[in-house]
Image (tube, rainbow, N blue to C red):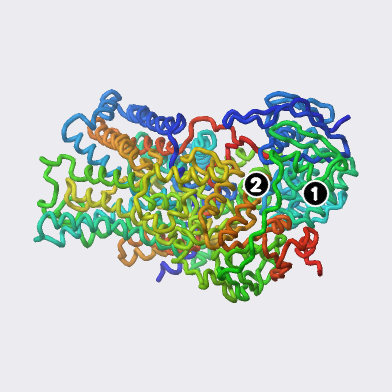
Amino acid sequence: MKVPSIRVPVSAGSLLRVAAPSLAAIVAGPLVVALFSGAPGAAIAAFAFGPVSSAGAASAFIEQSALLALCALGAALAFRSGSFNLGGEGQLYAGGLAGVLAALALPSASPAFALATALAAGALGGAALALPSALGKRFAGADVLLSSFLVSQAAVLAIDWLIASPLRDAESNLIATRMVSRAILPDRALFPAGYAPYAALLFAAALALFFARTGEGRAVDLYGGNPTFARSVGLPVGTLALWPLVGAGALHGLAGAFIALGPAGRAVRGMSGGMGWTAIAVSLLAANRPLAILPAALLLGWLDSGARQAAVFAGVPFDAALLVKAFVLLLATARLLPPRARRGVAS
Amino acid sequence: MSWLLSLPGDAVAQGGSIALAALGGLASDAAGVLNTALEGFMSLGAFVFALVAPRAGAFAGNLAAASAACMLAAVIIHAVFKLRADIFVAGLAGNLLVQGGVALLSWRAFGTKGVVALPELLSARLDPGPLAELPVIGTLASQRPSTLVLYVLAALLWLLLAGTPLGLRLRAAGQREEALSLAGVNPSRVRFMAFAISGMAAAIAGASLSAQTGAWVPGSTSGRGWIALVAVYLGRRRPGGAVAASLGFAALFAASNGLQVFDAPPELVLALPYVATALLVLAGKARLPRLRPRDEGPGREG
Amino acid sequence: MALLSAIGVSKYYPSTSTRANDGIDFRVEAGEFVALVGENGAGKSTFARIVAGLEEPDSGELRIKGTLLRRGRPGEAERLGVGFVPQVSSLAPGLSVAENLVLGREPLRFGFLLDLRRAEYEAAMLAERYGFPLDPGATVASLAPAERRSADILRALARGADLLVLDEPTSILTEAEAGKLFDLLDRLREAGKGVILISHRIREVLEVSDRIVVLRKGRVEASLRPDETDERSLAALAANAIPRERARKPPTAPGPTRLEFRAASLGKSGSAAARAVSFELRAGEVLGIAALAGNGLDALEDLAAAEREPEAGEVLVFGGRVKPRERSSLRRERLAYLPTDREGRGLSPRASLVDNALARTLAGGGRKALRGSRAMREAALRQNAWFGLRAEPSRPASTLSGGNRQRLVAARELSGSPDLVIAANPSQGLDASAQADLWSRLSELARAGSAVLLLTSSAEELLAVSTRAAVLYRGRLKLLAEDPARIDVHSVAAAMSGAAS
């Protein structure tokens, strides 16, 4: 299966390749918002400066970006191993639900232990949803692109039902589960943006180190580029087909658990909100490099937060952000410099 | 058990749109530019049709849907050929573009992002006369004309792929670009045409969804574009196979609608086609073609 | 009037700062068969592509039948009658021969439907006229390599070519198939067409061409008639260095058995299968097995490299069957494998040169250790430099030229001291000097105690390296000689084509 290019040496072309979609986002965002608003000035202002207009908005923006980064790190891990994981959305959702269920099941445990268990359950939930695709790839040569999307779609619908019917908190107005114990939620005075930013930094550093410095990381790249070669040269292809994709699911699931154990403190129907798709754009924008994912996530996080602000204060539908993300995704893999001479010395 | 008797008729009603979209997908696949934006094209068609048809009639509605699809195809193909973006990713971007754009435009045009009832879109069912009394055949025969148009278009697309010079060139473009360029045919142009054809087919398939429900329902495609894509591979990348697989999926959809009668949770019923397809894919029965790596083959260095 | 006259054609590639063509003068008359020879990188393909109008020269002029070839018009050369047959077949494999022939100017029925019957009729007429034995309705993928080549040529003729430019048309053909192809080309020459043939095979060039033009570093080194030269001096002219002596034979003191085939079979009952093959390969020897395409050499390669399991019989590597789990540790040090399919099995194109060079180290225990990137880089540089490959190690392998990719794979597999070496067509795509290096390295490994299995489709290569020689014909192994010094190329070639000896 084909996967977008993996690592690009830094050159004018690659800089442009990152700069152009970013610029497109920065220019197109306000433009779209203005176009669809009755009060373009207010809409643009809300879009451009909304994310940092107040301490609360800034924290929310940072938290969103960090969650996005976590998912994008997962996406990058899968992409570099040659698996085009389109199931992030479902993995995120499953992780959120699993995290909340684990937290609800441990009402009397110590908060630290309950939180750790809930996060682990979230990661496991996401990983469990990625596992069928990984097994299908490993044992039946099934295409991850198709299978991960389909499994995720089915899971999203099933979780929608779980949250709306058997697990629903009847006392709440939200379509959501019961709330977890407040004790395990981050103290917002100490951690205004929750725990997710720390997790994102930690995993970005770990993955960067993994790809740059370990043989295992090199093996993932070699396998992602050419599985036949990897098999022939003796790399452990059986495990390489499995774990990066399952790991990607776990990272999405972890992000889902952070969402559910965030301000809401419960699993809300539709809480994944398209983040799985945006994460793909982030990862591609960063050319699948872990460290580059952090600024890319901040950029697209800004877009999301800005669009939300514009929706609240200027009445522009939130979907404006989708349009802009689409442009970013369209340009994310583009190579904007003319190709070099195709053949040097031939014959 | 009445739903079981009307199943073939319902399947035919639903199958037309999937089959047309699947044949479109096949056209793009044959030319080596697999259209991962089928879902978006269907959505676009459904919306543009709902926008135009109430004022200008069904024919103009379909025409507008097809033109809009052509424009979207041009944007995606431009990104792929001129900016050398990845075709899969550009297709995904196309889906997002439609999702966001349609929501915004719907909000602008209809004042809501939700459902808009447009009963004038609904064409009358055919009256099969005495046949209507018969079980199975009754529902089979009383299709809407818009459904039949889909099957006619699907047959034409099939003929285009299998028996015309353009069909031959599409296949050549997917198999070996040089076969065309050495014959003086521009492969990029052939590929753009294939992609545009797939987009238009999906858009008209999507338009029929609005025509059949008599409303603009956001998300009315509910994964049909993806299902059509899977049908291409389940049908072993042949027109007949793709159509057969599409009808199979339509039967699944129709059955899941029937099951709703028994108070089954609608979400779970909606999930059934995905689960069924996922199982097929996971068993390795439906595979994407191995595309050539995007980096051009021979080295650029001596 | 000359079919083609080129004066002062030059082409410079700024991206690699190479002068691929440097003032080339070249002429082809009607009915003339001109061969273009030279090492990798001498500029042969570049010149061919310029003649075909696929690339534009920086300076110089080209006239086809007296008409000046103008720039910026891609289809012009073809309209003037140049037919280019690229190295890799350019036919769409899933379409029939006739469908490929009519692409771009399809006959119509009812004004919009493809008239397949007329297409096939026209193709059959054309094949008949030039005596090509081809079924126009056959799918290209179902044709034998030689048939596919002739279909390529037929396509050029169908488009009105008077000058055929063939880029290494015989590289994937057996000698017998090549012979048939040259018979066809002979007929075209008699019909007054001109032919430019690019080839590595010096003997074949001497046999078939009217004139031989030798390119070296983008310049015309010599232009000769075949009777003015011989194999040795022509090779010397083309090569940058004089070809070395035949590799020295390693002493044949038999060591322990490293690889053993016991009546091993693989593949369907067609000709491409290996059937009940038995042999033993011991440390210190080079067992060469030669076969023409379609005689089961691929199956033998898969079995020897433990890529696939035999369907019957046994293959024992180091005395046992290779379990998938053991593969990494084997490949890390003990088992070197240079596959025929270098692109598919030998490289990961998007990964860096370093990663590709050290892939075997990653396969074993080294995978787990944290490794400094500088140490890895240096190790890769050392390994590549030793095989004459100089390139920035952080670049993706896909940016290497074909020849350098071959070197990269060879450098990785033939470094260190593996116990068992499976070398399948090791010198394919290499120029003469790299080929000589590779052959002497294989002999050196055997002298140092490796067991080397050489699988090749070239009789010359078989005799240059093996200490024991065999051929595979229709899937069956036949030992030729315990001492290859006693046999010559002609008897090997005869055995490869199944002649009784």
Q: Quadrant of the C terminus of chain C?
A: bottom right
Q: Is A308 in front, or is A193?
A: A193
Asked if residue B142 can be seen in this view, the reply is no
Q: Position of residue C185 (x, y in %)?
A: 84, 47
Q: Position of residue C365 (x, y in %)?
A: 39, 58
Subunit that carries the residue with mark 2:
C
> Disc 1 residue type?
Glu
> As drawn, is C202 to the left or to the right of C299?
right
Q: Is A225 in front, or is C449?
A: C449
Q: Position of residue A233 (x, y in %)?
A: 50, 57
Q: Which residue is mark 1?
A: C204
Q: Secondary structure at mark 1?
A: helix
Mark 2 residue crowding within 10 angstroms, few (<14) / some (14–19) / many (20+):
many
> Disc 2 residue type?
Leu
> As drawn, is A244 to the left or to the right of C248?
left
The residue positioned 74% from the left and 61% from the top of the image is C485
Q: Quadrant of the N terminus of chain C?
A: top right
- Whichever of callouts 1 and 2 sits on the residue coming sooner in the sequence is 1
> As drawn, is C464 to the left or to the right of A295?
right
Q: Is C115 in front, or is A209?
A: A209
Query: Image quadrant of residue C239?
Result: top right
Residue C430 is marked as: 2
> As drawn, is C434 to the left or to the right of B260?
right
Residue A325 is marked as: none
Q: Secondary structure at mark 2?
A: loop
Query: Image quadrant of residue C267?
Result: bottom right
Q: CA distance from mark 1 to mark 2?
A: 18 Å
